[in-house]
Amino acid sequence: MVVSPLLALSTASAQQALMNSLNNGPVANQSLEQPSDYTYKNGDFRLWVTPSLDLQWDDNVQISQGAQESDFITRPTLGLMTTYPVSQQNLIKLDVNAGYSLYATHDNLDSFYLQSGSGLSFDVFIKDVQINLHDNFSYVQDSSQNSQVANTGSYGTFQNDAGLSASWDLTRVVLSAGYDHQNVQSTSGQFAQSDQATETLFARAGYVVSPRLTAGLESSASFTAYDQALLNNNQSYSMGAYADYKPDAYFDFQPRAGYVIYQYDQTSQSLQTANLNSWYADLRVTHAISDAISYSIDAGHRVTLGVQSDATSAWYVTPSATWNLTKNWTLNTSMSYENGQQGTGSTQLMPNANLVSESYSYYTGTLGVAHPITSRLAFNFDYRVTTRSSSAQERGYTQNVLELQLTYHPQ
């Protein structure tokens, strides 16, 4: 399934940074799970090279409600992954997917990109303590992948997340903690007000109730400073509970819920926002019904930093399903729905400052087919529709995208 070849653009929040840090799990021993048909090997060093070509037609590249402008986009991409085991337990991994978006007529939107998942990771094991050092980076310009943006095709970000996390397994108790530093820079001067640096600390303490159930507490703190004085510098703190229930190898149930506080320093002369006290909740379910059918659901409520406002609150649900119809043919279906309020807590908004206050609904649905043409060459064909409605004038749009991706796996 290809929802987008690029990163789903996001801004930092205490809860999101917590989940991002926890997702930077250990890569040690993954060499046992990686494909054996590497492109190059020298001793314990392995290299995988995966070139691909994306051909895409977009009927609304400016995601505008008015006169829609279509275009044909070509995206050549080169994926490079290297691994090197320092010891039997410690592994260095570098994964980079880079390419170029070439528009047939809107050449002002041409851009280099680094896909989601690009980064460097290194695991260190000290007895029962697993330490992960990581640096994840992306450079992406794809306006329709951010629910808060409308009327432009040039929104994008360069993001770099560097930090470390540690996990200590005490048999019945599992302790996790970490630190991340994130830099976000806009690819367009139009959104330079959201350029920022964020420091995040997180901690988790879980109790293994049974081999199938772990439950515990989690907390995080984030400190954000903007390069410009248009949005307000802020701090956010969260505290909540989580659980992970796996009754078998095919079903995983992960609920989270808690409370979050945003405190604003009122560093902006264009925007005033009251401190926020809110709540968050998230439920993730993954289930492999059979070898042929699997699905996942992620739903909840969150508060995040805004792109054109200090804060955005939203309800969301993102179900997806994979159907292995026949041998070597796979059907992928997914959707996402978000109902949000951009400008949550804002009490004063200066006009003509590229700031927004609105209620919006954002929907994306995808339908895709994947098939290996040969043992080395595979294709994906996807259709994606995105619709956005808004309480603000001319900030709704509809976009249709057809995409063909060819991927080659050399030996």
Image: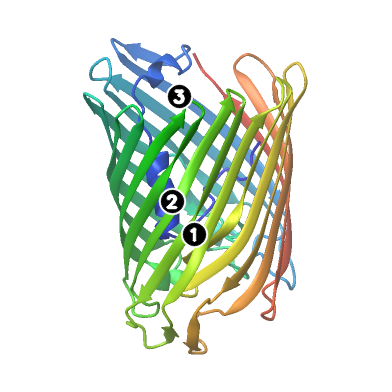
The amino acid at mark 2 is Tyr
The amino acid at mark 1 is Gly
Q: Nearer the viewer, residue 117 or 239?
A: 239
Write down the residue under mark 1: 156
Drawn side of residue 150 relative to residue 273, left or right: right
Work out whether 85 lies above or below 295. above
Write down the residue under mark 2: 139
Of labels 1 and 3, earlier in sequence is 3
Measure the C-alpha gap from mark 1 to mark 3.
26 Å
**x then y, percent, for residue 356:** 55, 79
Task: Kindly give the residue lying farthest to the left in the view shown.
Answer: 126
Measure the C-alpha gap from mark 2 to mark 3.
20 Å
Q: Secondary structure at mark 1?
A: strand
Q: Secondary structure at mark 3?
A: strand
Checking the image for residue 57, the label placed there is none
Q: Residues within 10 Å of mark 1 (few under 14, many from 20)?
A: many
**x then y, percent, for residue 301:** 57, 60
Write down the residue under mark 3: 49
Drawn side of residue 291 relative to residue 194, left or right: right
State the scheme by which the image is colored. Answer: rainbow
The amino acid at mark 3 is Val
Residue at image point 72% right, 67% down: 397
**x then y, percent, for residue 410:** 51, 17
Residue at image point 55% right, 68% down: 313
Q: Nearer the viewer, residue 299 or 335?
A: 299
- Residue 190 in view here: no
**x then y, percent, for residue 54:** 62, 39
